[in-house]
Amino acid sequence: MACCGGAISSDMRATVAEVPATKNATGPGYSIQGYEDLKYTYSFVDNVFDQQKEDLASYYTKWGRVLCVLDENLNEIYGDSIQAYFNAHNIKPTLNVFKGGELNKTMDTMLGFVDAMDKFGLIRKEPVLIVGGGLASDVLGYACASYRRSTNYIRVGTTLIALIDAAISIKVGINHKKLKNRLGAYHAPMHTFLDFDFLKTLPIGQTRNGTAEIIKILHCTDKHTWSMLVKYGEDLVNTAYGRNATGPGAKELKEAADTICRNAIKGMLDLESPNLHEIGLDRVIANGHSISPTLELAPFPPLRHGHAVTIDMAWSITLAHMRGYISDQDRDEWFGLAMSVGLSVGHPLLTNGLILEANEAIKKTRDGLQRFVLAKPLGKCVFANDISEEEFIKSLAVHKEYVKNSGRGDGVGLDAYADAGDLGADPEILLKERKVADVSRANGNGAQHEQLGNNKTAVAVAA
C-alpha cells in the first residue's frame, strides 16, 4: 500500500507453514511469520499554526474537520490561535480540553478521550490531533491505540521533553496505582510536527527539565554535538533555545540550538527505530533511567523527571570515572554543564538503600540484567551488568563527596521539584491531604483513610 498524505503505510505480508504435530495434537499445526512495514514521518515547522502555513492543515483537508486535544494551560495560550488556523483553512475545529498533570495520567483520563472520540464520531483512519507535552502524547496516544484497536493521530509537541524525547518514541501509556507507565502500548503517529517556537512560552524550569534528555543522548553518542552543548548550554536554557535571544549573538545561538536539537533527535531516532517494540533491552536511550524511576518519586513533591534523570547520569559518570572509562577532564566537563544549566546532580534521598532498591527494581524491567549505560569514553558508551553492591556503595560515597566539593551542596538544582502544572494539583494541598490520610491510617481509621484514598487515588502515583 502506498503512503498517501503522510499516512502510515502498511505493506503487509506473511507466510503460513505447516509444522509437524506435537505429541498430543490431532494433526499438524501452523507456524506464522507476519511482517508489517511501519512508516511514519517527522517535520520541523516553526510556528506551525501560522495561518499562512498549510503543513498541518493538509492532513485534515480531506475530512473538513479536526478533533484537537490539548490541556487547559495550552488552551488558554494557544486555543484561539488553533481555532483561527483551522477556520482559515476551512476545517472545522473541535477542541477537547483536559486537565493536565501527572496525577491525571490515569485510566479515567484515557477513557475520557475515548468518549470524546466517540462523541465526535471519529471515522476509521481519521487522525486525532494531539497538541501538548509528553503526558498528552502518552495518554492520548494510548487512547488512540485502544480506540478501535488502532486510531490514527498526529502529534505537535509543545515542551522540550516532548520535542526531544517523548515525541520520538512510539511508546504510549498511563500510570496504574503507584506504578508509573505500567499500562501502555506501542502505537506510532501518522506524523509528528516539531515546532520549537513553543519554547518561547515554556517556563524556564521546563526548558531546564528537557535539557536533561539532550544531555542523556549526546554524552553517550555524539562528542561533536556534545561539545556544542557544553559551549552554549547555559545560554540555550536562558533564551528558550535561542527563540527568545536578542542582540549580536542571537543568530549564532539559534543556529547552534537548531543544530544541537536536530542532532539529538536524529540520534534518538537512529537508536530507537530498529528497536521500536523494545525487543532488544540494551537501549542507549535508557541512559539515566536506571535509578531515576525510584528516585523521582521518593520525595514529595516528586522530582521533575529531567532532574531525576540527571542525578542518575551524574552518578553513572562518577562510576565511569572510577572504572577508568572517562578522564578527569571529561568528568569535570560533564558536571560543569549539568550544574551550569541548573540541573540536579545529587539528592539527600539518594542513599545506599535507595540505589540498591532501584537496582533490583530496574532488573525486573530489563529481564534480570542491570544494563546500566556508562560513558566509555565521553561520546560513546557501554552497558554494565556487573555492578556489585560494594561498587554501588563505594561509588555513591565518592559521588556525594565530589558533588559536595563542587560547591553544589547536596546537589539539588533549580526548579527541581514538580509544581502544580506538573502534577495537575497544588502540591501543598496534596501534602496536607496526604498527612491527614497518614494520621488516619495510624489511628486505625480504615474507612476514613479509604475515603481519602478514593478522593485522591492518583496522589500515590506521584508520591
Image (spheres, rainbow, N blue to C red):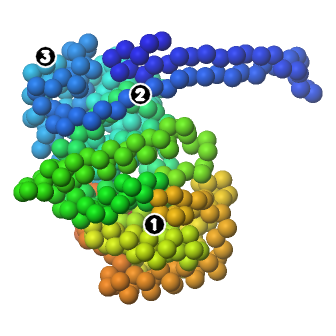
Q: Residue under circle 2? A: 40
Q: Dots 3 and 1: beta carbons under 8 Å? A: no
Q: Quadrant of residue 369?
A: bottom right
Q: Position of residue 124 (x, y in %)?
A: 38, 17
Q: Residue under circle 1? A: 313
Q: Residue under circle 3? A: 90
- Determine the residue positioned at 45% across, 38% down: 170
- Determine the residue positioned at 60% across, 51% down: 282
**How far apart are the alpha carbons under marks 3 and 2?**
26 Å
Q: Position of residue 351 (x, y in %)?
A: 50, 79
Residue 137 visible, this orientation: yes
Q: Name the kind of residue labelled 3 in the image.
A: Asn
Q: Position of residue 236 (x, y in %)?
A: 22, 58
Relative to residue 22, is residue 396 drawn left or right?
A: left
Viewer-closest of 184 and 104: 184
- Of circles 3 and 1, which is in front? 1
Q: Name the kind of residue labelled 2 in the image.
A: Tyr
Q: Position of residue 330 (x, y in %)?
A: 44, 71
Q: Of callouts 2 and 1, which one flags the residue occurring earlier in the amino acid sequence? A: 2
- Of circles 3 and 2, which is in front? 2
Relative to residue 283, is residue 414 drawn left or right?
A: left
How packed mark 3 is, by other alpha carbons closer than 10 Å (few <14, some 14-19, many 20 or more), is some
Relative to residue 234, is residue 299 drawn left or right?
A: right
**How far apart are the alpha carbons under marks 3 and 1?**
48 Å
